[in-house]
Amino acid sequence: MSRSVAVIGGGPAGLYAARLLKLADPKAEVVVHERNSTDTTTFGFGVGLTESTMANLTAADPETADRIRRTSHAGHDLVLRLDHEVRLHGARNLAIGRADLLDVLTKAAIEAGVDFREGSRVGLADVGADIVIAADGVRSAVRRELADRLGVHETLGRGHYMWCGADFAVDTAYFTARGEGDALFVAHAYPYAANRSTFLLEADDVSWAAAGLGDNDAAAAPGESDTASIALLERIFTEDLRARPLLANRSRWSRFTNLTMDRWSTGNVVLIGDAAHTAHYTLGSGTKLALEDSIALARALREHSDITDAFAAYEQARRP
């Protein structure tokens, strides 16, 4: 008998899980609830995908993997640039704009027969499906509602970071550090399109205080970019930016949330991606892990008729 599935969250994990489940059982009712509308600017810039992830995507869904590869920016190395350059690895990772990736995955899900509902703000009480997949990100409302049952553990990182972009493609992915007075800033830059790069900026508490970043953050209105800090960073990294401005999209200082849970499921609800676990942004693996979660969950649900057994198999495969 086909099972009904409600996916809360229309990011990469939710969209891809929905497509794979619909492909596995075309008669299944699969609905994705995405709280944002298409007229809402997608948060973020580019995301990285390794060749190992692309191999997993190809094995699970060759058509979508091919679309992602054709939309992605050509592979790049990773280097450390200080007084001299050190090559860290030559894995030739791919990168793709987050908005482009979401467009590919949304179309792929709809083509498979998934009911995609944008602007649909739902909670657990609003969905009556056999299976509920919480793919609503690091600030997951589902996880918050079920926290006592899941055993949630969260700690904040000590450093401060900000996502920005640039309107040109850097030659390769790299880390660098530049200082001003008592403040030291680190940048992780990588290309994700022919005319776009991600610039991820970091500062520790000493730099935060020395550069007055706390005052900048407090002066920025909720939901707006921290323009004062961005102007400072543009000056400090002017050489790396080729004297170009940083691109902002609700860009402001944050602390990384390290999230773990004792259990990734309870009852008929299972969590995937950042809703279940976080990966530090310098690893460039958050989207990779989310997509691979979707593959493992779809496989477990295909192989186990009992959802409790399926959820256990999924977690056993992915938790390591």
Image (cartoon, rainbow, N blue to C red):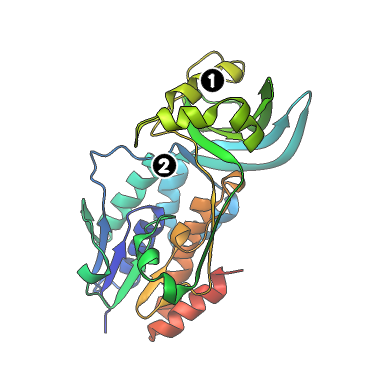
Taking the image as shown, residue 10 lies to the left or right of residue 113, namely: right
Residue 127 position, x and y percent, is 22, 70
Q: Nearer the viewer, residue 276 or 192?
A: 276
What is the crowding at mark 2: few (fewer than 14 residues within 10 Å), some, or many (at least 20)?
A: many
Q: Secondary structure at mark 2?
A: helix
Between 124 and 42, the one lying in front of the other is 124
The image shows residue 186, relative to residue 242, as above or below, that is below
The quadrant of the picture occupied by the C terminus is bottom right
229 with respect to 187 (left or right): left
Q: Three-letter amino acid code at disc 1? A: Leu
Question: Farthest top residue?
Answer: 243
Q: Residues within 10 Å of mark 1 (few under 14, many from 20)?
A: some
**Mark 2 touches mark 1? (CB < 8 Å):** no
Label 1 secondary element? helix
What residue do we see at 41% from left, 28% from top?
Answer: 219
47 vs 85, left or right, is left
Residue for point 67% across, 37% down: 78
Foreground residue among 141 and 193: 141
Depth check: 27 or 167 in front? 167
* Residue 94 in which image quadrant: top right
- Quadrant of image for the N terminus: bottom left
Q: Is residue 128 visible?
A: yes
| Residue 85 position in % (x across, y down) | 76, 28
Disc on the earlier residue, 2 or 1: 2
Please provide percent x and percent y for residue 28: 25, 73
Write down the residue under mark 1: 232
Nearest to viewer (mark 2 / mark 1): 1
Q: Which residue is mark 2?
A: 98
Q: Is residue 172 visible?
A: no
Q: Is residue 52 toward the left or the right of residue 177 in the image? A: left
